[in-house]
Amino acid sequence: MTEVKQNNDEKHGSFEAFIDGKRAGQMTYTWAGEERFIIDHTEVEEDYNGQGVGKDMLLAAVDFARKNGKTIIPLCPFAKATFQKHEELQDVLVNQTQA
């Protein structure tokens, strides 16, 4: 099972995935004001490719955004593609008129 931990400060943050206590991946973001953050990079360790680690981190980011009334700008190609494939996650995306 994947455990995802969030690290956050005033300007940047990340979601780190761990499987059996080993770091499996990291998704980084940058705050764009107080109400939204930009997912700028997703990286999964080679040993964990194809195991849904990236999606688990994205789901943690979506959960964080929903619980805290934040929106997401997905600049990272992985995050952008995953949002496009999953309409049920798109409620946290920044509207183009807001960007």
Image (cartoon, grey):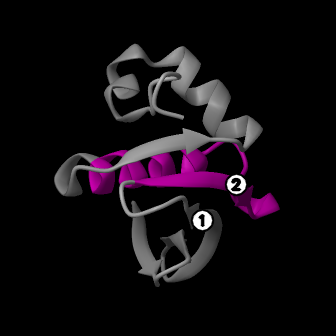
Give the tally of numbered discs.
2
Q: Nearer the viewer, mark 2 or mark 1?
A: 1
Magenta-drawn stretch contains 99: no
Q: Which of 97 and 11 is in front in this view?
A: 97
Q: Which of 80 and 52 is in front in this view?
A: 80
- Check the image and name the residue furthest to the left: 67
- Check the image and name the residue furthest to the right: 46
Q: Give residue 14's position: percent from left, percent from top.
A: 54, 71
Left or right relative to 34: residue 19:
right
Residue to which mark 2 is pinned: 40
Magenta-drawn stretch contains 37: yes
What residue span does the magenta drawing correspond to?
36-65
The amino acid at mark 1 is: Thr
CB under 8 Å between callouts 2 and 1?
A: yes
Q: Nearer the viewer, residue 72 or 78?
A: 72
Q: Give residue 95's position: percent from left, percent from top.
A: 45, 25
Q: Residue 84 carries which label?
A: none
**Distance from label 2 to label 1 (Cα)?**
7 Å
50 w.r.t. 23: above or below:
above
13 w.r.t. 9: above or below:
above
Residue to which mark 1 is pinned: 30
